Amino acid sequence: MRGYPAIADHGLIGDLQTAALVSSDGTVDWMCAPRFDSPSVFAALLDHERGGHLSVSADTQRPPVQLYLQDTAVLVTRFLGEAGVGEVVDFMPVDRPERPAARHRLVRILRVTRGRVRFSLECRPRFDYGRAAHRVDVGEHMVRFDGPGAQGFLQGLGPIAWTRDGDDVRSELTLGEGEFAAVVFTVGDSDDVPVPPMTAADVRTLFEGTRDFWHRWVRRSRYHGRWQDMVNRAAITLKLLTYAPTGAPVAAPTMGLPEQIGGTRNWDYRYTWVRDGSLSVGALLGLGYIEEAHAFRSWLGDRVRAGRTVSGEPLQIMYRVDGDPELPEEILDHFEGYRGSAPVRVGNGAAGQLQLDIYGEAALALAQALEDAGEVPPYDGWQALSGVLDWLVKAWDRPDEGIWETRGGQKDFTYSRVMCWAAFDRGIRMARDFSRPADTAAWGSARDDIMRQVMERGWDPARRAFVQQYGDTTLDASLLLMPSVGFISPKDPRWLSTLEAMEQELVSDSLVHRYNPQASPDGLRGSEGTFSLCSFLYVDALARAGQLGQARYAFDKMLTYANHAGLFAEEIGPTGEQLGNFPQAFTHLALITAALSLDHHMDAAR
């Protein structure tokens, strides 16, 4: 549809508290402020007419080209024409990211590297998901947009003169080789504090500081394996998606991007999942990003101690980045949705679901972080965790909604049981290693009961495979994690036959489906593509099973599905297009895990 670029046709910039998507034609068509989970300011990606955007275009003939400056989150969009070559350099300055900021800046530097280029600029903010009207005041040095509870300030440097266009502004200018112009958009809460004008020197200082920040951060990585560039890009993406004041990563910076074009599987991913964040700990520690891993450990520990949830359980599956458990789901009827994919949902009703696997992932993350730091858990924190495991002794053997947040009712999911096993297993290890008081006898009994139950009820002798749920024959790619958590040996005959069954049913040209919704209805209409997280989990499982040739082939092929900037959405469609919220943190942490696993096993094989 006109006005809707491909989901993958974007780069991501951010300041570690919020982020923006910039399409390869130079349009900022998604940004929320002041946090990832705040209302949108630009949301043309969900409604071309009502969403709002900040665009820079040029009258060049060839399609623009977009790339990152190496090992940074500074994005360059190049406009190529016979008369000249122009660039837009986009970034968000990283300034004291550990402190919540009421205002955030997006900087766009315009320059010409050859000839002369004519640029066109538009700024059309739409506050509160496009629901709120705003006023505009065009001053000599600054344009001010006033919405309810929010403000935007737009400054043009160089030969930029803003012309009012209704409640929006536009400008046109021509630059020659070596000439400079810039746009600085500042957005945040309405507090009537003026934004001081910036000079060209100020903008250059911000650019150099942002570039140097990312170079320093990447140098902290201890990864020097075979896929350096892709692993660095995945790590930068995870960092961009982490809310620095609390250390909590969001699943994605977007909401409403469809898993099927025109379909209804359109969810809000701007929150922190216990599962995703917990599994990121291993990837971060593997790269040497200890501070980030321990920041999430602290956030997770606070959730365990607080025990405040919508679901009434000790933990719930997701929270806001500040730990707030309230995520009421509503539908934005005024948005048409990406290419007509409706409804557009804000908030996430799955927050109230029962998903028992999160206790295993939380225990895994806490155990990994403590082991890496060589720390003894604080007594109060240990008491909270052991209290959760005491509760889980009586609570693990229940149907739940499962890892994929289906809306087809609670069932006895095998993966949920496996992760409950992991919760008890890691709890027993921590109690032993740190000499902490615990009812390890009860935990051990529950752990053993789960093992026997899964081996009896989660195993289908006819299919010779572990199945998605008890009493069913459907396969599920989440079980690819069984060897990595230690539930089963990666070369156990039961596991190898399960892996073979998955290859026959869930794998398509090295890409992996989560499950077959036709075989196991999930309560939702429509279909979906292959799940990129699962494709990388498949690589890790192959590597652990010793099938290194097949693992490397699958990994290298999967990397070809990254977009031009090295980013992945949630899913890959039947013709190779990226689908779902973008970019997805889960996919990038799985890429890192797969690369670390492949490097380790390939080096060992040599």
Image (cartoon, rainbow, N blue to C red):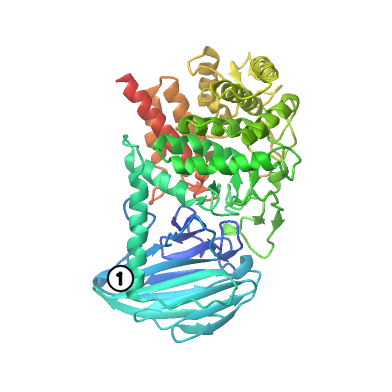
Residue 103 versus residue 506 in the image, above or below: below
Residue located farthest toward the bottom when viewing the structure as drawn: 140
Residue 333 versus residue 394 in the image, above or below: below
Q: Secondary structure at mark 1?
A: strand
- Residue placed under numbered mark 1 in the picture: 111
Residue 16 seen in render: yes
- The one nearer the camera, 304 or 588, is 304
Number of on-image labels: 1
- The one nearer the camera, 548 or 374, is 374
Residue 529 seen in render: no
Q: Residue 551 is drawn in which quadrant?
A: top left
Image x and y of residue 414, in percent: 65, 25
Residue at left offset 57%, top offset 32%: 377
Amino acid marked by disc 1: Arg
Q: Quarter of the image for the C terminus: give it.
A: top left
- The one nearer the camera, 32 or 459, is 32
Residue at left offset 27%, top offset 75%: 179
